[in-house]
Amino acid sequence: MTLKRFEALNWASSFLSKHGRDANIGEILLCHRLGLTRTELLVDIRESLKKEDEIWFKDGVIQHVKTGEPVQYMTGTETFYGRTFHVSPAVLIPRPETEELIEWVKNWANLYFPHKKELSVCDIGTGSGAIAITLALEKPEWHVSTVDLSADAIKVAKDNAKNLHATVDFYEGSFLQPLIDHHKKVDILVSNPPYISKEGMQSLQDVVKDHEPHLALSGGEDGLDAYRCILKEVRQIMKDQLLIGFEIGYDQGEAIQNLIKQTFDQQIEALKVMKDINGNDRVALAFVRSV
Ligand code: GLN
């Protein structure tokens, strides 16, 4: 006799809670295994599992408790902006907060480029490609290029672009260098670079610190190194005007505004820090001119 879905889920949630893990992980794993949405899983909650699914499920829950590996790396997927992205330990797991960056960039692009449809966009440090691919799909008339230092991350991102039928140009390299080398000029620059400070890295949750790539998290002593590198070179890739959209750390709003002011001074037309749903600084937006 195999377990029914609800019996397996009850076992998983009490086992997970007992070991201090998120009790919902059972549901996520079982949905993934059976290829069902949460609603589909729950509608037929009394259905018996196949033996091989039950074994896979129990092993998965036990493995998660043992290793603390994020469930997204176990299933190899995460949803971002309503689409399923493939993820591996080579890339940061896309976060819901980053969806807010997409919203703001779409908004400001409408506001500051009201008559220009074919905009050229770059995403610096793309990881899974979540930002670049989402923008390419949301705005099919935009030309999206993206850069990452990690060849393994680019493989994941290319795979996602292919599966989701998005057209994005990929460059391997450091910050803006590949774009400079290819004489690329853009209207919009977006980035969710590594921004955790040295101190912040020490207090990260284990599930993040032990499993996600530090290359995508650690932003040097004060967490701002990546922004400095990008802003140092940004004039070389901008057209007459540039919209910048950065994801930033919860307390970095003022510091980022200062860095942007140091770079563009009188040429800033708009500069704002937006808070996320938790009331933390999350997105910095700027619209600047080259002269
Ligand atoms: N938001 C991520 C975290 O808190 C950090 C992402 C980043 O450094 N870009 O884990």
Image (cartoon, helix red, strand yellow):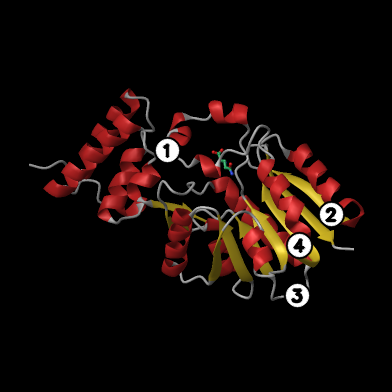
> In this figure, which residue is indicated by the disc labeled 2?
270
Mark 4 neighbour density, 10 Å: few (under 14) some (14–19) many (20 or more): some
Which label's residue is closer to the chain start, 3 or 1?
3
Instruction: Give the alpha-carbon distance from disc 4 to disc 1, as whole Å.
Output: 35 Å
Q: Earlier in the sequence, mark 4 or mark 3?
A: 3
What residue lies at 69% left-to-right and 70% top-to-bottom? 183
Quarter of the figure with residue 276:
top right
Residue at disc 1, secondary structure: loop
Which label number is shown at residue 116? 3
Q: Is residue 115 above or below residue 66?
A: below
Question: x, y percentage for residue 232?
Answer: 76, 51
| Horizontal and vertical percent position of residue 52 | 14, 48
Q: Which mark is residue 236?
A: 4
* Other-residue count near label 3 (Cα within 10 Å), few / some / many at <14 / 14–19 / ≥20: few
Q: Quadrant of ligand 1?
A: top right
Q: How many badges with numbers are in the image?
A: 4
Whether label 3 lies within 8 Å of ligand 1 gets the answer no
Q: Position of residue 67 (x, y in %)?
A: 33, 32
Please tell me which of labels 4 and 1 falls first in the chain. 1
Residue at image mark 1? 211
**Which numbered disc, 2 or 1, marks the residue that appears first in the sequence?**
1
Mark 1 is on which residue type?
His
Quadrant for the N terminus, please.
Answer: top left
Eye-nearest disc, 4 or 1? 4
- The answer to whether residue 190 is left or right of residue 234 is left
Q: Is residue 173 above or below residue 239?
A: above
Name the residue located 49 percent from the left edge and 46 percent from the top edge.
Answer: 92
Q: Are marks 3 and 2 in contact (CB under 8 Å)?
A: no
Sequence-earlier tag: 4 or 2 = 4
Residues at marks 2 and 1, CA–CA distance in whole angstroms = 38 Å
